[in-house]
């Protein structure tokens, strides 16, 4: 007999976990389906020898702490999740290698950040402070828009929140230029661009401001036992509220009712499952491929075809048989670049060492690996289309190992380190790996590119017009906010609240 | 100096955004999504990591007393067009139905990666005295037998950025199988290292793949094989054990990696020998330990009063109950009941069998506890190396 639920959530990634936990805790019968045998999607861990690696998280923004909780801290707390948060109060060290290069370390806290920037780029402090002032102004404007239930008074917006409207419609670079921020300060300020996957001459200023603002104001946070801890805490929130989570349960088809509304799903073994509401943590691209043609609105196909798939990465995980002190590493996050301009970094991304991140988790979590060892984690931006078109399965391992070798050597040279001789464990992930674990087209991680014309602002504003299939709600990296963990969690919460409202009439 | 301001930027721009986006969407085709195979990453993923592979036995080769190799080819009739490529040293998890039981077993691939491209894998199976799977395979598999196997799995592979340029391979008995693949891959130029193989057997007649190994060594100067017999003397063989002294005698000057595959007895013996060599940990690689047995022999194990316990298994909302001997792992008891449970390495390492312990006490030997840190806190276990100490309830995943 087919089973019926109030809510079926497809995909136990960050968005799906929060969505399912939220609907279950609202008293709705909830089934979360996951094709793999672990929760979290990107938010997981894997073990090699005596090391347990964090596969994707650099740091969470918008966390805060008990005294000053930000959105994510509150989200977890409200779901009854206890997370052992660890903090890092240096935002990053950015090193541009070469003649005209620089090497700066930026502390968190607006004052400290401005101080560090002034030291690196004399005369920049005022414009940098003005940049952070916009974060606050944007928050006030968004609070007003929310208070007006999305229908703000237009005149008031123009008179009181004009800067918000500018930030919402211009690129990061345009805003910085207007503020008169010196070129070098802009380059340092824009170091984080790859966390949103679009270079700053195209990236929406408000989006970037909210992320940088949060890292600088709250510092960065991460769970003590890596992101698997986050995923298990969310899973527990779901299960303890009576929800179910089925692993190794791949959805192969979406079912629709006679009115074209989503009615359920079919698993790979033929099991049919029905629900009043379906939340998809699966990217629309894949949902359309699993739906009857006549049930996919034409506009949704056009929207999907108008977009570019988002960024993905090659990531190199190293377990080293020396401590971070013996290795000579002091920083958690180091951005290494060969030129300072994000557009150039993006365009020339295939050049070895152009722009990448290297993290050492032991700097924040001393005992993240056994005594006398440490872990390094390289993140190298890539797009699915960057992969060699005719790469054969038998060439794949050599191809990825060669990338790893080149970047390890680049970092050794830049930092004066000996990494190679200490490698006790190594694992190299590529878009192929992400395609394997996430099932996304091209192995994308951040859904659709946050292009200038398709910014978070426009996506939010057009949400109801973009996705019109009744009883089907999307959440996750491909949803309105794009990018990383915090955004995916928030879209999961938003999706759940909308579903709860539809099923329970406004009680969340 | 004027105060930084955004006044130079027009706010009218805000109003232009939506029409611009709408125009962009309208101009895009209402075409279906490109197929997954059109993306390089997904195409490679499908080729390298299929969820399962359906194969057929095309040849059975006698390797020795109670040892046979099975050549497996893709079975397009059941949906497998070609075999996944692999790295020498990897294994396949074979799914079996033996009587009422549904179970899996990991077997190292004894053929080369190049041969997978040519269309076959070879698995080599030795009959174990009470081995449910090995006896079943040797008694039942024949040309034409249909088999389901996993994608190639396992971390017992050569990693050029990690390992030394020379590998001293230490094989015991049927633990030679991955080294046959390594030797072939080195000879084929698919792996770039020197293989100094020490192959230990009890008697000369127990040596497997001798002809193949000698042929490879004769034509490839990077592969060298020494047969070591513990209870026999024979021409071209050394007599004795796979001791630290012997390893040192065959190892090159400077750094070298040691790769080990054999019985649990061999691993325990080498635990006493390897420390004498003063190797860094990174240079010692051991293949999967295999199924953990006799927990009651462990120090610290407190035997429960009863010999059996009641196990309640939750799977996709269904409940199964069974009686399980406390000396068997939870996975074995679940499989004997015919409940299809996921499992691959069966050594505590890969986590494929990962299950949630809802209630009850269990024993997990520390040496094979491969769980993730947070799994300890949230009550997850690997049933393949977990023994019940009383009645337990656990939720498993579908196979």
Image (cartoon, coloured by chain):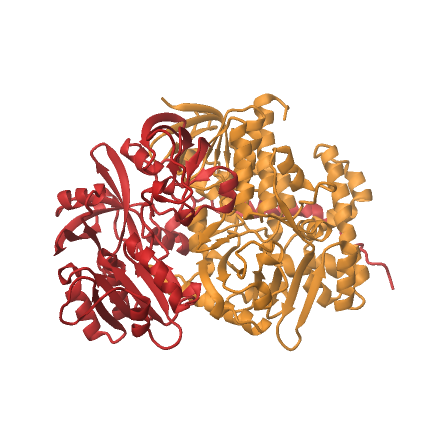
**Above or below — where is A400 with respect to A149?**
below
- Give residue B275's position: percent from left, percent from top: 40, 64
Residue B305 seen in this snapshot: yes
Question: Hue of chain A?
Answer: orange
Residue located at (42% from left, 32% from top): B395
**Could you say which quadrant of the image residue A68 lies in?**
top right
**Could you say which quadrant of the image residue A467 lies in?**
top right
Q: Is residue A41 left or right of residue A502?
A: left
Residue located at (52% from left, 52% from top): A54
- Give residue B140's position: percent from left, percent from top: 14, 42
Q: Is residue A79 left or right of residue B380?
A: right
Question: Hue of chain B?
Answer: red
**Could you say which quadrant of the image residue A2 lies in?**
top left
- Give residue A250's position: percent from left, percent from top: 40, 38
Q: B4 or A43: which is nearer to us?
A: A43
Residue located at (48% from left, 41% from top): A39
Q: A60 or B215: which is nearer to us?
A: B215
């Amino acid at each position: 007999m087919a089973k019926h639920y109030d809510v079926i959530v497809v995909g136990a990634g960050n968005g799906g976990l929060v969505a399912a936990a939220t609907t279950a805790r609202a008293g709705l019968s909830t089934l979360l389906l996951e094709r793999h045998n672990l929760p979290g999607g990107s938010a997981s861990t894997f073990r090699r020898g005596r090391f347990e690696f964090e596969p994707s998280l650099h740091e969470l923004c918008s966390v805060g702490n008990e005294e000053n909780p930000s959105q994510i801290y509150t989200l977890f707390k409200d779901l009854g999740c206890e997370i052992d948060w660890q903090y890092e109060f240096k935002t990053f060290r950015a090193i541009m290698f070469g003649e005209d290069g620089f090497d700066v370390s930026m502390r968190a806290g607006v004052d400290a950040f401005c101080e560090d920037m002034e030291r690196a780029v004399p005369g920049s402090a005022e414009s940098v402070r003005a940049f952070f002032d916009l974060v606050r102004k944007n928050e006030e404007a968004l609070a007003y828009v929310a208070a007006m239930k999305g229908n703000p008074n237009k005149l008031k917006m123009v008179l009181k929140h004009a800067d918000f409207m500018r930030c919402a419609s211009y690129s990061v670079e345009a805003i910085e230029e207007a503020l008169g921020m010196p070129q070098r300060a802009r380059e340092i300020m824009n170091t984080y661009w790859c966390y949103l996957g679009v270079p700053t001459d195209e990236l929406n200023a408000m989006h970037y401001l909210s992320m940088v603002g949060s890292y600088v104001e709250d510092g960065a946070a991460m769970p003590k036992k890596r992101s698997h801890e986050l995923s298990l805490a969310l899973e527990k929130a779901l299960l303890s509220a009576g929800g179910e989570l089925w692993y190794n349960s791949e959805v192969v088809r979406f079912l629709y009712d006679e009115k074209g509304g989503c009615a359920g799903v079919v698993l790979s073994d033929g099991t049919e499952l029905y629900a009043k509401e379906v939340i998809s943590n699966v990217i629309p691209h894949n949902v359309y491929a699993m739906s009857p043609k006549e049930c996919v609105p034409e506009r949704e196909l056009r929207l999907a075809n108008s977009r570019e798939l988002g960024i993905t990465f090659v990531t190199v995980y190293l377990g080293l048989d020396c401590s971070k002190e013996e290795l000579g590493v002091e920083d958690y996050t180091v951005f290494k670049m060969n030129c300072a301009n994000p557009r150039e970094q993006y365009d020339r991304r295939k050049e070895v060492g152009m722009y990448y991140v290297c993290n050492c988790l032991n700097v924040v979590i001393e005992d993240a690996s056994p005594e006398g060892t440490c872990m390094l984690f390289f993140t190298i931006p890539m797009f699915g289309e960057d992969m060699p078109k005719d790469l054969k399965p038998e060439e794949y391992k050599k191809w990825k190992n060669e990338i790893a070798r080149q970047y390890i050597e680049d970092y050794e040279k830049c930092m004066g380190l000996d990494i190679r001789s200490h490698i006790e464990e190594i694992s190299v992930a590529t878009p192929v790996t992400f395609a394997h674990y996430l099932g996304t087209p091209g192995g994308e991680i951040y859904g659709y590119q946050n292009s200038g014309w398709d910014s978070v602002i426009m996506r939010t504003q057009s949400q109801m017009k973009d996705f019109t299939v009744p009883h089907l709600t999307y959440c996750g990296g491909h949803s309105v906010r794009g990018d990383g963990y915090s955004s995916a969690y928030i879209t999961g919460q938003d999706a759940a609240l909308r579903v709860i409202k539809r099923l329970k009439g406004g009680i969340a | 100096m004027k105060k930084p301001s955004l006044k130079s930027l027009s706010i009218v721009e805000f109003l232009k955004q939506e029409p611009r986006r709408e125009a962009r969407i309208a101009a895009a085709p209402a075409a279906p999504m490109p197929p997954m195979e059109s993306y390089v990453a997904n195409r490679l993923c499908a080729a390298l990591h299929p969820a399962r592979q359906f194969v057929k036995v095309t040849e059975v080769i006698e390797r020795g007393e109670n040892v046979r190799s099975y050549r497996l080819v893709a079975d397009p009739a059941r949906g497998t067009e070609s075999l996944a490529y692999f790295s020498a040293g990897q294994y396949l998890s074979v799914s079996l139905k033996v009587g009422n039981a549904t179970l899996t077993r990991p077997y190292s691939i004894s053929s080369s990666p190049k041969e997978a491209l040519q269309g076959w894998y070879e698995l080599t199976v030795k009959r174990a005295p009470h081995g449910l799977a090995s006896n079943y395979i040797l008694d039942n598999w024949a040309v034409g037998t249909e088999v389901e196997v996993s994608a190639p799995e396992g971390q017992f592979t050569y990693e050029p950025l990690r390992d030394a340029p020379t590998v001293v391979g230490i094989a015991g008995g049927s633990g030679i199988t991955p080294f046959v693949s390594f030797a072939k891959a080195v000879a084929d130029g698919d792996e770039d290292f020197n293989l100094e193989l020490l192959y230990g057997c009890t008697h000369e007649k127990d040596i497997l793949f001798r002809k193949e190994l000698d042929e490879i060594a004769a034509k490839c100067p990077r592969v060298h094989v020494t047969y070591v017999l513990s209870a026999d003397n024979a021409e071209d063989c050394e007599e004795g054990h796979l001791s630290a002294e012997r390893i040192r005698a065959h190892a090159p000057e400077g750094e070298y990696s040691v790769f080990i595959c054999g019985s649990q007895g061999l691993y325990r013996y080498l635990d006493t020998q390897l420390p004498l060599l003063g190797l860094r940990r990174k240079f010692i690689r051991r293949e999967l330990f295999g199924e953990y047995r006799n927990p009651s022999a462990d120090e610290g194990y407190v035997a429960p009063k009863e010999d059996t316990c009641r196990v309640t298994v939750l799977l996709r909302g269904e409940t199964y109950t069974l009686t399980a001997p406390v000396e068997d792992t939870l996975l074995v008891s679940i499989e004997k009941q015919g409940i299809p449970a996921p499992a691959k390495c069966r050594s505590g390492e890969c986590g494929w069998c990962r299950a949630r312990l809802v209630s009850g006490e269990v024993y997990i030997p520390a040496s094979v506890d491969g769980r993730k840190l947070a799994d300890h806190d949230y009550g997850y276990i690997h049933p393949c190396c977990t023994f019940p100490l009383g009645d337990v309830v656990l939720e498993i995943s579908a196979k």
